[in-house]
Amino acid sequence: MKGVNALVFLVSWFSVLMMSNGADTINSTVPLADGKTIISSGGTFELGFFSPGTSTNRYLGIWYKKISSDLNVVWVANREAPINDTSGVLKVSEEGILTVLNGTNGVVWSSNSSSSVPNPVAQLLESGNLVVRNSNDDNPDNYMWQTFDYPSHTLLPGMKLGRNLVTGLDRYLTSWKTSDDPARGAYKYLLDPRGYPQIVLMNGDKEIYGTGPWTGLRFSGSQGLKPNSIYTYGLVYNQVEVYYGFQLINSSVYSRLVLNPDGVVQRLTWNYRTGEWNVYLSMPVDNCDIYGLCQGFGSCNIGNSPVCGCLDKFVPKYPRDWENADWSNGCVRETPLVTSDCQRGDGFLKYPGKKLPDTRNSSYNGSLTLDDCHKVCLENCSCMAYANSDSRNGGSGCLLWFGELFDVRDLTENGQDLYIRVAASEISSTTPQSGTSKKKRGKIVVALPILAGILLLGLGVALYFWKKKKPRQQEEPLKWEGEQNGMLDEGREIAIKRLSKSSSQGLDEFKNEVICIAKLQHRNLVKLLGCCIEGEEKMLVYEYMPNNSLDSFIFDKTRSRSLDWPKRFNIIKGTARGLLYLHQDSRLRIIHRDLKAANILLDIDMNPKISDFGMARSFGGNETEANTQRVVGTYGYMSPEYAIDGLFSVKSDVFSFGVLVLEIVSGKKNRGFFHEDHQHNLIGHAWILFKEGRASELIDTDLSNSCYLFEVLRSIHIGLLCVQQSPEDRPSMSSVVMMLGGESTLPQPKEPGFFTKRNMFSEEFSSSNQTLASANEISITMLQAR
């Protein structure tokens, strides 16, 4: 027995001695105490307990061993639970679970692996990766757990920034709170899984910088990312995973990507001569890197003053705001698109040298040519732009955008060609176009003048008769130049909206809308007070709403605090009553078609009033639904049957109302919502929480002191009933009003519309009329330095 005890003592003593002298592994026999470390085999990295900056708290972390700097830490375990003394230990259990314990044996951090291995050891690799494996198996595919799967604020060579699409594991960087506090800060740097691959920098739920989509050589807007002598980089994109990563060309060079507490992403390279980390590149770089600064169809040029401008053939939606450097409403087309026949009435202009737009509302096909891409986009009336998905070797593949184009900027080098949908009348023979048009341009130039004259004459005659037979463009909303305030003689403050002279709609359409609005009288609808028609001037005069629109409150972190639950619930109920009047109690059944937070105005007492009837349609008799060839409205609020097939009914408005309810409760936008645990929008997130009995987690934190939990949870339940996939399953607005005002048992909602995960591997381009199979897989290996 004494011999056994002596053997145990010798093994323990040898283990402690090895750790004291920098061994690279620990096992379940002896823990790693504060004051002891393990060192990777080549001496590059070290693991142990440390105190960051001026803090006295202790954390388990990994840092560069060979160089001395306060910025050497690359990974931290117990970020949220520091130890306030030197009693901490790291243990490896017999099942292979890593735990950090404090002086009272309380667990402050755990690796939480769901599997186990025999004879486990934790090893610090020369790459800086701490792995748990079988002591007799060093195959990386068999690692039980590794720190490279759970980054903190640093991306090291060989790490993956992205998502495993099979397991759902998402690897992204999160900033420290401060240089002295490694707890998770406000910023995240992640590969966005929605649409075509791009990396985004988030401040909470708000996107503040986007790299643009991957082009085969770089991310479209990352000008500093180019072949170099220090590292290679690339994107892997296939059915199993999508991730960005880099590798060092010379292992003696230290280079890494760091997300700082102030939200700046930097590539740092160690300078042996000065003994400092040099900044090799930094993101964001300038004001044009601010995400969506110029909004829809705007483009940012850092050499201009002001930096924002509208793309060619586009004009500011509200010119007066634009003159005051308020670009929040973006740009609209000078000439609206043709609604009756988009394939003949529309075309595409080439916009060279651009950072490609945000790709969350995009589809792609890697096997199509640019000509194919042109045809596919032209035939889908909802497709707004296209470009090559791969810029190498002259360009290949196809990227399609749907809806407004955001985050475009002019680039001085390495910009891409972007083709944007415009009215055919905007395209001249000298305007650069795409595909077949480009190939034929040479033939047009050498044509005989007399032939050109004949063609132009024929075109003029054809246009004359086409215009005479052209049906009314009922689907195009009125274009307004902005809103101004005024005062009536009796002292009543009013709001004045002036119809843009570039609006495609004329006097008859303007009168029809005025008559429609004038006949709507309800406390929860904005009241029209008068109108003015004189020559080319057309204006509406309506009651002034001093508190602006709902979206200016619920999506603003500061102003949202003033909107407590009683106010929000009053807005929900008032909006429901306004919709009920439109659908049932007005002389004609009115479908709004653009119900959203921006179109809910608030009076001085924060009462809601539905506004903006530019897209509204009226039904008479027994009409219940209609179909349109061009879908108008706002992405994120459209019902599936309307967005996909152009079918709209009162149930389309019910869907939009359901989205609005979920946004009011959560304080988050449905469009652009992101959650680190899944790829769903706000609707999908609410559905998941509801099914798991965790609906209360959806509630805006600003409501914690003012909400009546029963009312809030009931509102979430009603919102999910309204956004069900099938229109037949959604309640009518009369039922919604009763449900909001009562306490009766509610039916269980079915799966909502647009619940399917945002899948970047969609096998189809979707349109109301056709689908097209697309390539499923792209595999892009690391690029070699030049």
Image: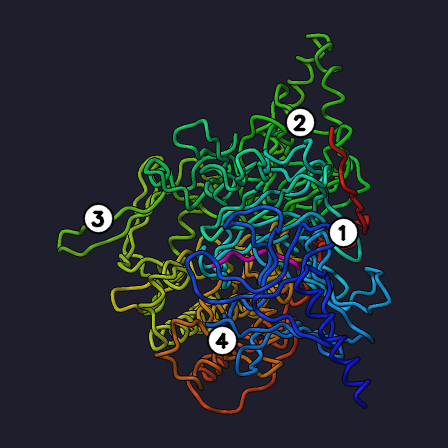
Q: Secondary structure at mark 3?
A: strand
- Identify the mark nearer the N-term, 3 or 4: 3
Kindly give the residue lying farthest to the front in the view shown.
2
Please give the name of the residue rendered at 71% of the width and 35% of the height, measured from the top-left corner. Answer: 217
* Mark 2 vs mark 1: in front: 2
| Position above or below: 155 against 712 | above
- Identify the mark nearer the N-term, 3 or 2: 2
Tell me if mark 4 has few (under 14), some (14-19) or many (20+) residues whose alpha carbon lies within 10 angstroms of its own.
many
Q: Position of residue 462 (x, y in %)?
A: 65, 27
Residue 173 highlighted magenta (yes or no): yes
| Position above or below: 134 against 467 | below
Please give the name of the residue rendered at 65% of the width and 23% of the height, measured from the top-left corner. Answer: 459
Q: Which residue is mark 1?
A: 770
Q: In the image, which residues are magenta?
A: 171-176
Q: Secondary structure at mark 4?
A: helix
C-alpha gap between disc 2 and disc 1: 24 Å
C-alpha gap between disc 3 and disc 4: 35 Å
Would residue 591 be visible to someone looking at this image?
no
C-alpha gap between disc 1 and disc 3: 49 Å
Amino acid type shown at disc 4: Met
* Mark 4 vs mark 2: in front: 2
C-alpha gap between disc 4 and disc 1: 33 Å
Residue 486: numbered disc:
3
Q: Position of residue 163 (x, y in %)?
A: 70, 58
Q: Which residue is mark 4?
A: 733
Amino acid type shown at disc 3: Gly
Q: Quadrant of the C terminus?
A: top right
